[in-house]
Image (cartoon, rainbow, N blue to C red):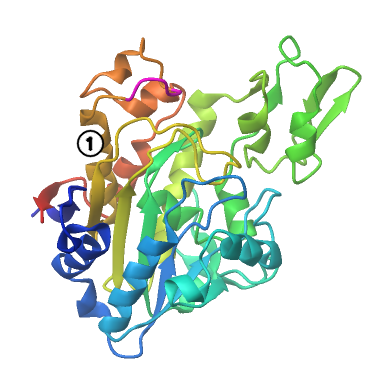
Amino acid sequence: MPSQVYFANLRARSASDNKIAKLGRLFAAAGFGAFLAPGRLTAIKVHFGESGNDTFLSPVLAAAVVDQVKQAGGKPFLTDTNTLYGGSRHNAVDHLTTALRHGFGMEVTGAPLIIADGLLGECQAEVEIPGRRITRARVAGTIVRAEAMLVLSHFKGHELAGFGGAIKNLAMGCATGAGKRDQHSPRFTVNAETCIGCGECESVCPEDAARVDGDRASIDKDRCIGCGECYIHCPQKAVEIDWRTEVPVFMERMTEYALAAVQGKQDRLGFVNFLLNVTPDCDCCSWSDAPLVPDIGILASTDPVALDAACLDLVNRTAALPGTHLHRSSAAWQPGADKFTGLWGHTQGRIQLEYGQELGLGSLDYELVTI
């Protein structure tokens, strides 16, 4: 039997059809209220956005989900984990400051903020999973102890994973720093012919693995944790990776961590994906590029694999917008083409869907129900 994925488009001619009202109908259709018993501590997993990014999920929409949880009797809190790389969310103090600057304070959302892995990633629990690559995952303690969880994901591109939705939000977003290191198996090298020695990689590396000596950079593989910051920020694209061998392992590790994040509450989980501002990059970037496609809608399900599969299909069925990072000359620009593979040709995003189904995280077989 296919998993149910509920879809709301963005047309509205009255208050009864605004996004907040539609979130309420999605919440009801997906049956989220059924697992929110009175007093149940409910994590609402969001991404607060890196400083400089402005296409992260709106706190107004997060507040609408908070209201639904409260009406169902749950006790909601907004949560995320600290980043592996340096930046505005590397520790809980900076992370909370960024969340407040981005509008996620209780006066807007109606829920407290908790950084799930503690001040410096010390709040951790080990979770056993039947993974091919990982059998003991290190998940944020607050996520593990939460009695229910709703995962709100801004669906968009990602230069390593291809695309990021519910699965990636679970995997990276619920892991501690140690858990993020477990997932980031790729190791990077520098192409000396294209490197200009600008030092950008050195400035963003959280482990001092990237260094500029003279007019060329190099990366110490023993120190590298595979976070990909050097790769993303290099203006010359001189930082390289063996995509054929490194990426499939990374994708499998990431998917295994998604499975770890849901252990113990498989029947108390809900997922909402927002096909708004479908940018080429993750919200961890300190910028927001132009959206690849027009805004499409909001989707909800209790199955993260089916939900991400439906989002991917909807994006791919849509013609790309002009003037984006996906060039109009690309075959992927047309309706029906794989937008994210066209954008990042080296990625293998579908691994997270196919391996997720193999692990029992969810199903690729879905029915899209429009509300």
x 31%, y 13%: residue: 331
The residue stretch that appears in magenta: 321-325
Reply yes or no: does residue 231 show up in magenta.
no
Q: Residue furthest front?
A: 14
* Residue in the foreground of this view, choosing between 117 and 102: 102
Count of number-bearing discs = 1
Q: From the top left corner, tell me how far across and down residue 132 is, in percent.
A: 43, 48
Q: Is residue 134 above or below residue 250?
A: below
Quarter of the image for residue 337 reads top left
Quarter of the image for residue 163 reads top left
Q: Is residue 274 left or right of residue 54?
A: left
Where, quadrant-wise, is the C terminus in this rendering? bottom left
* Magenta span: chief secondary structure: loop
Q: From the top left corner, tell me how far across and down residue 324 is, in percent.
A: 42, 24
Judging by the rendered image, the residue that carries numbered circle 1 is 313
Q: Is residue 183 visible?
A: yes
Q: Is residue 51 left or right of residue 359?
A: right
Q: Is residue 253 above or below residue 342?
A: below
Q: From the top left corner, tell me how far across and down residue 42 is, in percent.
A: 39, 77
Q: Secondary structure under badge 1?
A: helix
Q: From the top left corner, tell me how far across and down residue 334 is, in percent.
A: 25, 19
